Image (tube, grey):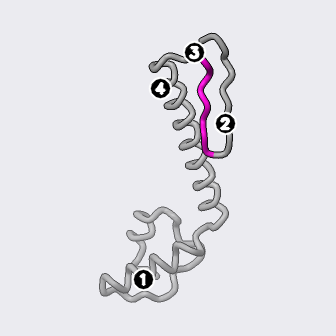
Amino acid sequence: MKDSTLEIEEDRLRMPRGATTSEAAAIAVAVSTHVADQRKVASEEAKDEQGWDGERFAFAGRLEALGQDSRRVPQNAPTDRWQAAGRADRY
């Protein structure tokens, strides 16, 4: 590559001049992977901030759909769905 400047404008990725097809593909894959990783981290952080509150009511609805009593799921119930399901008889 002659000019190694990579520009990102809004949603467009501008490849350096003289980049070969394989170099452009490698750059696109690297940037795409980075953006996907950043979105995943942001999603996980948002989920952590929301905590169990949003999920526990959905979990109670799933219990009711399965014919189990759907009393309130306690706030201290495990946030892992498998663990919570294993303790559903106690809610």
Residue depicted at x 63% and y 52%: 42
| Whole-percent x, y for residue 37 in the image | 56, 42
Q: Is residue 16 above or below residue 63?
A: above
* Separation of residues labelled 3 and 2 (CA atoms): 17 Å
Q: Which residue is mark 2?
A: 8
Label 1 SS: helix
Query: Would residue 46 be found to the left or right of residue 58 on screen?
Result: right
How many neighbours does mark 3 have within 10 angstroms: few (below 14), some (14-19), or many (20 or more)?
A: few
Residue depicted at x 54% and y 26%: 27
For residue 25, which numbered disc appears in the image? 4
Which of the two discs, 1 and 2, labels the residue nearer the N terminus? 2
Query: Would residue 10 be found to the left or right of residue 44 on screen?
Result: right
Please say whether residue 12 is one of the residues in the magenta stretch.
yes
Q: Are marks 4 and 2 in contact (CB under 8 Å)?
A: no
* Separation of residues labelled 1 and 2 (CA atoms): 44 Å
| Whole-percent x, y for residue 54 in the image | 57, 74
| Res 4 → quadrant | top right
Q: Are marks 1 and 2 in contact (CB under 8 Å)?
A: no
* Separation of residues labelled 4 and 3 (CA atoms): 13 Å
Q: Which residue is mark 3?
A: 18
Which of the two discs, 3 and 1, labels the residue nearer the N terminus? 3
> How many badges with numbers are in the image?
4
Please say whether residue 73 is one of the residues in the magenta stretch.
no
| Whole-percent x, y for residue 55 in the image | 52, 72
Q: Which residues are magenta?
A: 11-17
Q: Which residue is mark 1?
A: 61
How many neighbours does mark 1 have within 10 angstroms: few (below 14), some (14-19), or many (20 or more)?
A: some
